[in-house]
Amino acid sequence: MRSCATLMSKRRIWPGAVSSRAMLRIEDLHVYYGKAHVLRGISLHVSPGELVAVIGPNGAGKTTLFRTISGLKESHNGTISFQNTPLAKDPAKIVRVGVIHCPEGRHLFSDMTVRENLEMGAFRWDHRDLSGDLERVYTLFPVLKEREHQIARTLSGGEQQMLAIGRALMSRPELLLLDEPTLGLAPIVRKAIADALKQINGHGVTILLAEQNVAFALANAQRVYLLETGQIVKVGTPEELRTDERVQKVYLGRV
Amino acid sequence: MEQFLVIVERIVIFSVLVSALYALVALGFTMIFGVGRVLNLAHGALLMVGAYTAWFAQRLGLELYLAAGLAVVVCALLAVALYQGLIRHVQHSVIITLIATLACALLLEEIVKIFFTTTPQILQPFISGSVIFHQTTIISNRILAFGASWAAILLFWIFVHRTRWGKVILATAQDQEGAALVGINVRHVYTVTWALSGALAGLAGVFFASWVNLSPFMWRDPLIISFAIVVVGGLGSLKGSIVAAYLIGFLEVFMTYSPSIRFCADFRCFEFLGPSWVGVPSLMMLVLILFLKPSGLFGRAHG
């Protein structure tokens, strides 16, 4: 028994040593919607503490990728591992290991107040130590404190997005999946979201961000994947993508 | 004039009493729709199973209190079996769900026919006798049904709005995907709501049997009532359901007391309004509301 345990722990330390630098590792992921082959062999990784963006046009598969990671959509092939362990297929279990998905369209509890929404975010923790977590979210987004007792449905788009991020933070993510947080928001709100992302990331939360707004992604991420029709066609630092001729033409509108 | 006042008094008392029961009948149906977006056409049949379970247990010599408890448990289990065995797999399609739940209702009707024949049966009431209020005689058991219905509705409201489990159910009802992403096991929530809905149907069945006799066809009225109440009140709205239950209950009782206009042609006579029209106003109102305000009186249009 004892030797077995030693072996197990060694196996975790040794061969994993290199790959353990990746917090999230996706290999050859294939996903279908009916007969449509939406993700065609995606491989990517995110290291602890990174802020990685996935950019690409509408319909490229960004949202499908995120939904598959968080267990809302099943994959046909490929592996997703988190902290060197294969990720479960059940959203509730995935939340419990610390992978938190802040979805496109926010999916707030629209008839609950701001505070109730945030409290539901702490469901994973059985609503323990609420006040400290609430305080952190309110510091990050002071407007949520002002709107504490307002019904979520009545918030502006930007406030709803802040609430969605706040609710995700209440789950204390180790890896935060942020899908299109700036969609339809005014530049000034985008700026506030960008500042918040930097702060969240600065506190040690690893972030995987999906963005159609390429300029926003390049300005905020440390590494960027370009996704087109279900395949990763380019990966690099924002600088590398910014100087790429194709990215300039198609996504940044420069000639 | 005095005669008229007596009739008004009776309409008011009887409609207040029966409407509470109607609200209870519709409660489980509303909840299943509100949380899982499923229209459970087997809801009336669950009520029937509750009534027959209580009746059969009573015939075996059980006290009605125990028999009613048994009915509640049996219906809760049956509802969970229905969800796990069938609904869960067809829930994504509204049409298939409607057909499947209707088929279940008809199947239960057949089963009841086989075991208990079509002969109407009577469930012995919790309390016998009647109370005379002013000039109106009220069957005591119906007052009990009224009290129990309101107690069940209030307990249910407290459960949903004041307990942690209730919050989880509300969250799932408001956004299933959002619920899953904060770590709620949505399927567990559905199972619990089906169990609750079944239990409420069982309880409603026991009390419904104090208004009508038991028969294999008794599931139709409660289903139509639930449907009308839920559409009129706004699908998934508890407050709306109660208001609608009172509207429909009042219209029905009013119809039983309204004078009918009789006109005869050749050898056939027809009645316009009056007791034989009892079932009409709820359905008329259902159609009218669908036409004028499809989201119901208290409902919001769902995206």
Image (cartoon, coloured by chain):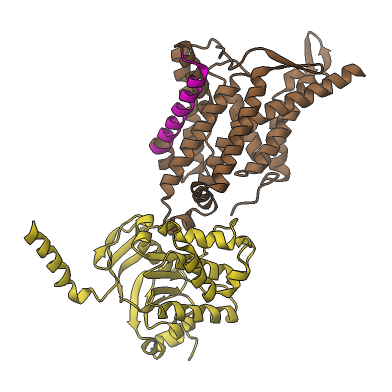
Q: Considering only vertical position in the picture, is B115 above or below A55?
A: above
Residue drawn at (41%, 36%) of the image: B86
- Residue furthest to the right: B1
Residue drawn at (76%, 20%) of the image: B256
Residue A195 screen position, x and y as percent: 50, 81
Q: Quadrant of the N terminus of chain B?
A: top right
Q: Is residue B70 magenta?
A: yes
Residue drawn at (56%, 62%) of the image: A115
- Residue furthest to the left: A3
Give the letter of the brown chain: B
* Residue A185, quarter of picture: bottom right
Give the letter of the yellow chain: A
Residue B48 screen position, x and y as percent: 52, 23
Q: Quadrant of the C terminus of chain B?
A: bottom right
Residue B46 screen position, x and y as percent: 50, 28
* Residue A37, quarter of picture: bottom left
Q: Is residue B48 magenta?
A: no
Magenta highlight: main SS? helix
The front one of B30 and A148 is A148
* Residue A217, quarter of picture: bottom left
Residue A71 screen position, x and y as percent: 37, 58
Magenta stretch: give its range.
Answer: B62-84
